[in-house]
Image (spheres, coloured by chain):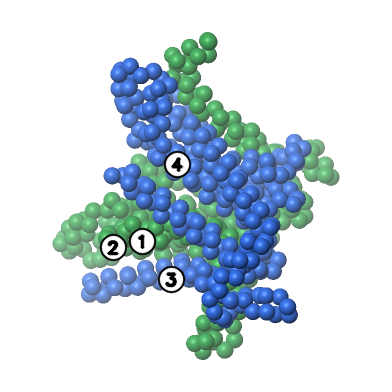
């Protein structure tokens, strides 16, 4: 009986994984599907398997707007990761290291941007920039993304710094190191894994962000998620399968690397 | 020089200096915009929708119209439903990974995290290709002669629920896993040897011990679900619009900023209340699950 229950549970788990992976598997498989010519245009069949081909990956490199969107998203994400890593990291360090008046209030305040629905957040910023007469563009996208990236990195790093032992710093002082040297040779190496984890999250959130970016982008600027959105809504281009497969591969590598790193950190 | 001395002597000054960039940034670019929405929600605006002219409660009175109340009610019920389905799918999965399949833990956990880190729009697009009229699922069903005509999966409320569950299932598995990981299996044997059945053991031992995980998982699904608007828009179509879509339409299509602001405030208020209830629960249990 017990064996039967265990098997039933295993089947259930299998079903959950099928549910999670069937759309993704289908998408990856069909990104390698051969195209067919319909009325002079090469289209991909989402229906029939016509044979293995890399043609959609080739066409990707022939699309300047796609490459531009990709590199724009990557550069914005890199900048957001660095800035929020630094700003959120300082705040998280201060939270876990010091006692100060207003500490709990500060902590609660930084939780709010994380939980507020993104749509209301995006519209609020849209109104705000409109009133302030700020020109929309890459700068407003970055400003908008930082408002949620900083609190997220703060939360992640705060959790990572929670076990931080300040006695180690005091040991460095008593051995004659000054503040700067202690910070650079003792504190920074200790908090580095947390900073990396937070920045990686900020990178992913920024790279993936659609709502805030599209509200604050202005005309003519398109990040990768905005481009994918436009193609979903206004006629699906088959090469979307190929873009999606590439971003999927990227996030898979990111997950495997970060999991391996954190496993190593535990040892 | 004086400032440096102050920083050297006073810990509090150092703490404030380090926290101030994050604090100032969020005040200027988060709190200020939200306050504008708050003011707009209580204002009669000039025709361009930029300047508040007079105080009014009209937007909130308007939001009580049956049509709008229906949206709020629908959004609440759907979010609750999605949370329940996610828990029903996620709890056994997390339990299996944390307690039963210990050997394959790392791999299984990664398999859960990968969809979670995969671009939201990519996953949405994958669902559309799977479920569309001549999508893979319909082709499969036709091929197996299970149906004669393709089934209409998209552009109805079922597609929205399906999509929301799909996006949020990994979100419940991770916190549930975190709370079940520490679970002591010998408790199960102890319970069984005292004569409890499986169901009783689950209800009286396993579930109560994993309650912080259940609470965290529920809040992680319920709260973002309330503000969902891309999934209803792309998968469910106009028939299954939620409050998020309503707010979007008010701002970007009908330009009724006061009403849109009032709805934003209502949504934010609901989210904050849920969050406070959750934090209350945490401080009672004394557990941190995030």
Name the spot of residue A181 as percent of width and height, x first.
40, 22
| Foreground: disc 4 or disc 2 | 4
Q: CA distance from mark 3 to mark 1?
A: 13 Å
Q: Which chain is green?
A: B
Q: How many marks?
A: 4
Give me the C-alpha separation between circle 4 and circle 2: 30 Å
**Rendered image: mark on residue B124:** none
Q: Nearer the viewer, mark 1 or mark 4?
A: 4
Q: Is residue B129 left or right of residue A219?
A: left
Q: CA distance from mark 2 to mark 3?
A: 18 Å
- Counting from the top left corner in percent of width and height, residue B148 is at 57, 89
User: Neighbour class for label 4 at 10 Å: few (<14), some, many (≥20)?
Assistant: some
Q: Which chain is blue?
A: A
Q: CA distance from mark 1 to mark 2?
A: 9 Å
Residue at image x 51%, y 60%?
A248
Where does label 2 land, which residue?
B101
Q: Which residue is mark 4?
A: A196
Using the image, name the chain to which the residue with label 4 belongs: A
**Residue to which mark 1 is pinned:** B108
Disc 4 or 3, which lies upstream in sequence?
3
Taking the view exactly as shown, the residue that stands out farthest to the left is B193
- Circle 1 packing at 10 Å, graded few (<14), some (14-19), many (20+), is some
Dot 3 corresponds to which residue?
A18
Left or right of A150 in this view: A35? right
Marks 3 and 1 belong to one chain: no
Q: Chain of mark 3?
A: A
Same chain letter for marks 1 and 2 = yes
Residues at circles 4 and 2 in contact by the CB criterion of under 8 Å: no
Q: Chain of mark 1?
A: B
Q: Is residue B234 visible?
A: no
Residue B5 coordinates in the image, percent (x, y): 48, 12
């Amino acid at each position: 009986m017990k064996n039967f229950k265990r098997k039933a549970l295993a089947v259930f788990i299998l079903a959950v994984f099928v549910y999670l992976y069937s759309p993704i598997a289908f998408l990856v498989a069909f990104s390698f599907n051969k195209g067919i010519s319909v009325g002079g245009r090469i289209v991909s069949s989402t229906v029939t398997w016509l044979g293995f081909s890399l043609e959609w990956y080739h066409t990707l490199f022939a699309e300047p707007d796609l490459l531009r969107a990709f590199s724009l998203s990557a550069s914005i994400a890199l900048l957001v990761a660095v800035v929020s890593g630094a700003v959120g990291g300082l705040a998280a360090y201060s939270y876990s290291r010091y006692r100060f008046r207003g500490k709990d209030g500060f902590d609660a305040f930084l939780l709010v941007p994380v939980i507020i629905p993104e749509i209301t957040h995006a519209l609020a910023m849209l109104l705000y920039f409109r009133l302030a007469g700020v020109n929309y563009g890459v700068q407003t996208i970055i400003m908008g993304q930082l408002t949620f990236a900083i609190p997220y990195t703060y939360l992640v790093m705060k959790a990572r710094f929670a076990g931080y032992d300040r006695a180690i710093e005091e040991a460095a002082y008593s051995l004659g190191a000054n503040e700067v040297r202690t910070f650079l040779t003792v504190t920074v190496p200790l908090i580095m894994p947390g900073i990396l984890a937070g920045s990686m999250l900020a990178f992913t959130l920024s790279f993936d962000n659609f709502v805030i970016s599209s509200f604050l982008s202005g005309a003519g600027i398109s990040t990768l998620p905005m481009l994918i959105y436009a193609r979903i809504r206004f006629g699906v281009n088959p090469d979307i399968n190929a873009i999606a497969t590439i971003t999927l591969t990227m996030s898979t590598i990111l997950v495997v690397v970060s999991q391996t790193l954190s496993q190593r950190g535990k040892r | 020089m004086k400032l440096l001395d102050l920083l050297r002597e006073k810990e509090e000054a150092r703490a404030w200096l380090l926290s101030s960039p994050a604090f100032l940034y969020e005040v200027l670019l988060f709190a200020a915009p939200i306050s504008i929405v708050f003011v707009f929600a209580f204002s009669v605006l000039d025709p361009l929708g930029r300047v508040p002219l007079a105080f009014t409660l009209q937007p909130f009175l308007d939001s009580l119209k049956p049509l709008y109340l229906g949206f709020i009610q629908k959004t609440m019920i759907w979010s609750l439903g999605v949370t329940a389905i996610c828990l029903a799918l996620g709890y056994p999965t997390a339990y299996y990974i944390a307690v039963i399949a210990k050997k394959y833990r790392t791999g299984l956990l990664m398999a859960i995290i990968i969809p979670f880190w995969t671009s939201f729009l990519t996953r949405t697009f994958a669902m559309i290709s799977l479920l569309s009229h001549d999508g893979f699922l319909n082709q499969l069903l036709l091929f197996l002669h299970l149906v004669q005509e393709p089934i209409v999966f998209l552009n109805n409320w079922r597609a929205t629920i399906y999509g929301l569950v799909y996006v949020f299932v990994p979100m419940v598995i991770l916190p549930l896993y975190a709370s079940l990981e520490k679970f002591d299996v010998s408790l199960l044997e102890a319970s069984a040897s005292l004569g409890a059945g499986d169901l009783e053991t689950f209800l009286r031992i396993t579930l109560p011990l994993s309650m912080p995980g259940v609470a965290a998982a529920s809040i992680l699904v319920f709260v973002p679900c309330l503000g969902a608007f891309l999934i209803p828009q792309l998968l469910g179509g106009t028939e299954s619009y939620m409050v998020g879509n309503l707010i979007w339409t008010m701002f970007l299509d009908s330009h009724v900023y006061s009403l849109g602001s009032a709805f934003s405030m209502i949504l934010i208020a609901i989210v904050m209340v849920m969050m406070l209830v959750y934090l209350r629960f945490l401080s009672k249990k004394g557990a941190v699950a995030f």
